[in-house]
Image (spheres, rainbow, N blue to C red):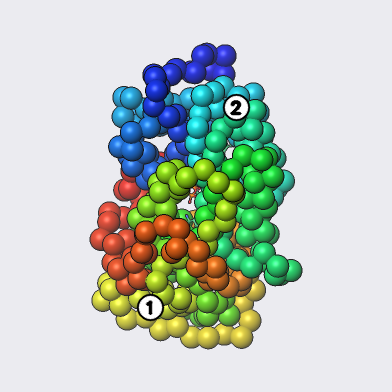
Amino acid sequence: MTPNDPVPTQSGQRPVVLLAGATGYVGGRLIPLLEKSGAVLRCLARTPDKLRPRVAPSTEVVAGDVLDPASLGLAMQGVTTAYYLVHLMSGSKDFEKDDRQAAMNFAEAARKAAVQRIIYLGGLGDDQDPDLSPHLRSRQEVGKILRDSGVETIEFRASLVIGSGSLSFDLVKSLTDRLPVMLCPKWLSTPTQPIAVDDVLAYLLAAKDLPPGESRVFEIGCRDVTTYGNMIRECARQQGLRRWLISVPVLTPYLSSLWLALVTPASFEVGRHLIEGLKNPTVVRDKAALDVFSIRPMGIREAVAKALSLPEPDKVQTP
Ligand SMILES: NC(=O)c1ccc[n+]([C@@H]2O[C@H](COP(=O)([O-])OP(=O)(O)OC[C@H]3O[C@@H](n4cnc5c(N)ncnc54)[C@H](OP(=O)(O)O)[C@@H]3O)[C@@H](O)[C@H]2O)c1
């Protein structure tokens, strides 16, 4: 489908849900849940042909790029709820600028199309912290841009998503699998509250059915607060591996990312942005999600066990 083609629609009376980021880790896993939810699902993809074999025949796949406003107007036609599960960290020379522009384009298209709700998954972190990493600051800026459009926006803020194929979890797992002895930079002891991918998906799905209201930000995390070092220890423990973590006084984010590039599958660029964020605590401070949703996130042990029981990251379904 080209931007000039009419958007296929077989919605009738059923609500139309747009999913941007359908080829990504989280978006790809949300597809089957949305397909079962009774809504008409429309996926936005830069390369529709890659996505089509992976969705149900009833799911619409439309060509679109969040940096190309014209392509978004067509995709938003008739949409009631629009998911924004996009980031531009890979392949962008200036991801903060591109993510800002992309969010502005998406928000404006949603506003013009009278979309009723945007649902966005961003990052945890203290927005008042002047030392917040560019990646986390940018994730929160995207949420604000979406809210400022006037379209009701439900923003979830999560730390690392635990699941096979999640880039940040794969970093942790690769470190565990490949390095019997690890020099530990300071960031391995930063407090964090990661979350299992199944719990993230449950929140994203439930947000679609909230009664109409004000824009909201929900901080979400698993039951336990931990550290990246302890996540490595837990991955090792569950795989029966013996690992030694030795503290070193200085290992800058730059050196850490060089080191990561040697031992993990993540691209140097994306790994560097993620590592910069590891110095910032990512812990749930506002527990409102537990009041508003009936979801009770699992603990770290169960989340890691589930992630480790899945196929190797390069064999999971998301391209
Ligand atoms: N994974 C985690 O641990 C984690 C943790 C906290 C929050 N989050 C948030 O969850 C959301 C999804 O993350 P993810 O891990 O699923 O990311 P991901 O696997 O890297 O997927 C990113 C998605 O963005 C799409 N995209 C990139 N540039 C685009 C453009 N110009 N136009 C349209 N689509 C574009 C990609 O499509 P292509 O296939 O065309 O590249 C892909 O579908 C992000 O907002 C992220 O910040 C993730």
Q: Secondary structure at mark 1?
A: helix
Residue 184, horizontal then vertical, whole percent: 52, 80
Residue 94 drawn at (x, y percent)? 70, 47
Cα distance in 3D space between marks 1 and 2: 48 Å
Q: Quadrant of residue 280?
A: bottom right
Instruction: Answer with the quarter of the image where residue 162 lies.
Output: bottom left
Q: Nearer the viewer, residue 228 or 107?
A: 107
Residue type beneath disc 1: Arg
Task: Identify the mark at residue 274; answer none if there is no mark.
Answer: none
Image check: 107 left or right of 240?
right
Q: Is residue 66 left or right of residue 42?
A: right
Residue beneath disc 1: 233
Identify which residue is drawn at 62% across, 39% down: 151
Residue 71 to residue 297: above or below: above
Asked if one can make out residue 276 in the rendered structure from this viewpoint, the answer is yes
Callout 2 crowding tier (Cα within 10 Å): few <14, some 14–19, many ≥20: some
Q: Quadrant of residue 257?
A: bottom right
In the foreground, 148 or 58: 148
Residue sitting at x 70%, y 67% = 128
Q: What type is the residue that disc 2 sits on?
A: Ala
SS at badge 2: loop
Q: Position of residue 302 (x, y in %)?
A: 30, 68
**Residue assigned mark 2:** 113
